[in-house]
Each structure stands twice: as C-alpha cells, then as structure tokens.
Image: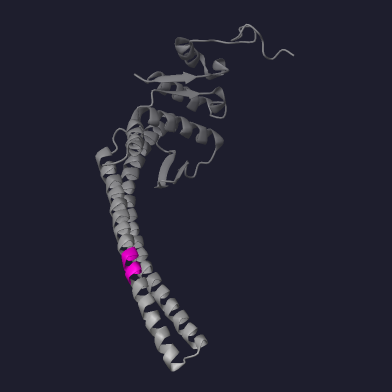
C-alpha cells in the first residue's frame, strides 16, 4: 500500500537497523497515504458538487436579477442602490463559502496533528531502543578502556532531526576521540555496516594506556573489518608494537612510498 520509493527508503532503514519494525513503519506510512488519498477524493467530489451548485445558483441569481430589474423599472429604484444591494449580497456569498472551506481546513489540520502524534510515538519507541543498545555498547567499551569509574559517552536522540553525542562531565579531546571510536565499534556490531576506517589523527590525542586497550579491542573484532592508519607504534610499548605488526598489511616510511612518484617533491 506504499509507493516504491517509500518502500525503498524503509528498506534502507532496515538495512542499517535490522531490528527496526519495518512492518510497523510501513503500516504508518500506508496509513498516511490512505488519509491523503481519501482527503483528495473527498475534496475532488466536494469541488465537483460545488461547481454544480455554483451553476444552479448562477442561473437562479440571473433569473432573480432579471425579475429585480423588471420590478425596478416599474417602481423607479435608483441604480446606485440596486448596485449596492448586489455588492453586499456578493460579499455575503463569498464570506459563506470561505467559512465552509475554513471549517474543512480546520478538520484536516486536526487529522494531521493526530497522525503526527501517533508517528512521533512510534519513532520515540524506536529511538529509545537505539539509545539503549548503543549506550550499552559505549559503557562496555569505556569500562575496558578507562575503567568503571569514568563516565562513558552517551547517545541521546531527541527527535528524527536532532541528537547529541557527548561525554558527560568529561569533555577532554582524548575522551571525545575515544568515545567516537566506541561509537564506530557499536555501529559495526549493531548494524550491517561491513567495515570502519580510522585515520591516525584520531589516536594522536588519546592517552597511551587507553590507546593500548583500544588496539586490543580492535584486534578482537571478528567477521567485520577495521582499517587503521597508525603512527609511532614504538611509544606504545613492545606488546602493542607486536600486536600492530601482526595485523599490518602495508607499512610506509620516508623511503617506502605508496606510489612510485613522491607527491611531496616540488
């Protein structure tokens, strides 16, 4: 009961959030489209009926005006008074029609508000589930990296268009970057996302001990891929250096270039 384009959009949501209730989303969107279809059909029928009534009224007005003109000729009513009466009647008729359409618009606005409220309730339940799952992952990640005494990063979804991701009471740069890594790992575990890529700049602001623990977490990831650019492995200790070497696919240096030509050369 929904358009192919909307079905495709819902399918994309399901692709990244497999636990989302696709059937419920489809029902809500189908409900909205049915309301729109019913309203359009109703307005079309009412417009057709209004046109018929307009034609009948126009004929009746024409007949009455002819009678009035005929009567005025016999009684000698001034033309300016007659024109004023007709002008007032025209304003009254127009105001009546406007009032009718205003009442119909008010009914439609109420229906839209009710539908949006129901949709917001559905979204809220979905957002709460996403928050719960992601924040559980962030808390576990933080416990391993920093210990249970440190606050973990939190995801808070306020609406479909607004969210916050922060580390309460701990706004340091290193903690923020570590929280970002935890979020990426949560997305990797909770969605169909096949891989993540981290540049070395993410790790430069994180303390050495925390980086060691993060690398052990990354090395334990199964079934998904993590691509990592990493510098200065020696300063993290021999165990970490061995761990990095075990997973190294490509190692570059001043002499070992990625390309045959050095792009830094003038």
Closer-to-camera residue (244/122): 122
Q: How many marks?
A: 0
What's the magenta bit mostly, secondary-structure-wise?
A: helix
By what rule are the colours in the image chosen? Answer: one colour
* Residues rendered magenta in the picture: 50-56
Residue 241 coordinates in the image, percent (x, y)? 50, 14
64 magenta-colored:
no
Closer-to-camera residue (126/77): 77
- Residue appearing at x 32%, y 43% in the figure: 126
- Residue appearing at x 52%, y 10% in the figure: 250
Q: Quadrant of the C terminus?
A: top right
Q: Quadrant of residue 258?
A: top right
Residue 35 coordinates in the image, percent (x, y)? 29, 53
**163 w.r.t. 112: above or below:** above
Closer-to-camera residue (7/236): 7
Q: Quadrant of residue 88?
A: bottom left
* Residue at the farthest right position: 266
Residue 221 coordinates in the image, percent (x, y)? 37, 21
């Amino acid at each position: 009961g929904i358009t192919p384009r909307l079905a495709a959009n819902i399918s994309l949501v399901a692709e990244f959030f497999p636990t989302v209730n696709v059937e419920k989303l489809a029902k809500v969107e189908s409900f909205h489209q049915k309301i729109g279809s019913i309203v359009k059909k109703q307005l079309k029928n009412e417009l057709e009926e209004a046109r018929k009534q307009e034609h009948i009224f126009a004929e009746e007005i024409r007949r009455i005006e002819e009678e009035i003109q005929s009567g005025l000729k016999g009684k000698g009513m001034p033309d300016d008074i007659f024109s004023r009466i007709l002008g007032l009647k025209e304003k009254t008729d127009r105001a009546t029609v406007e009032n009718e359409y205003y009442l119909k618009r008010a009914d439609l606005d109420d229906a839209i508000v009710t539908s949006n409220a129901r949709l917001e309730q559905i979204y809220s339940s979905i957002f709460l589930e996403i928050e719960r799952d992601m924040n559980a992952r962030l808390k576990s990640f933080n416990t391993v990296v920093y210990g249970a005494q440190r606050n973990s990063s939190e995801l808070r979804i306020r609406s479909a268009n607004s969210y916050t991701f922060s580390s309460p009471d701990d706004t340091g740069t290193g903690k923020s970057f570590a929280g970002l890594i935890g979020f990426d790992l949560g997305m990797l575990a909770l969605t169909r996302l096949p891989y993540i890529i981290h540049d070395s700049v993410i790790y430069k602001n994180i303390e050495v001990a925390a980086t060691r623990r993060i690398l052990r977490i990354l090395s334990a990831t199964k079934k998904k891929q993590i691509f990592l650019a990493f510098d200065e492995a020696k300063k993290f200790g021999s165990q970490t250096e061995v761990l990095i070497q075990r997973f190294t696919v490509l190692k570059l240096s001043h002499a070992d270039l990625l390309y045959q030509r050095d792009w830094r050369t003038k």
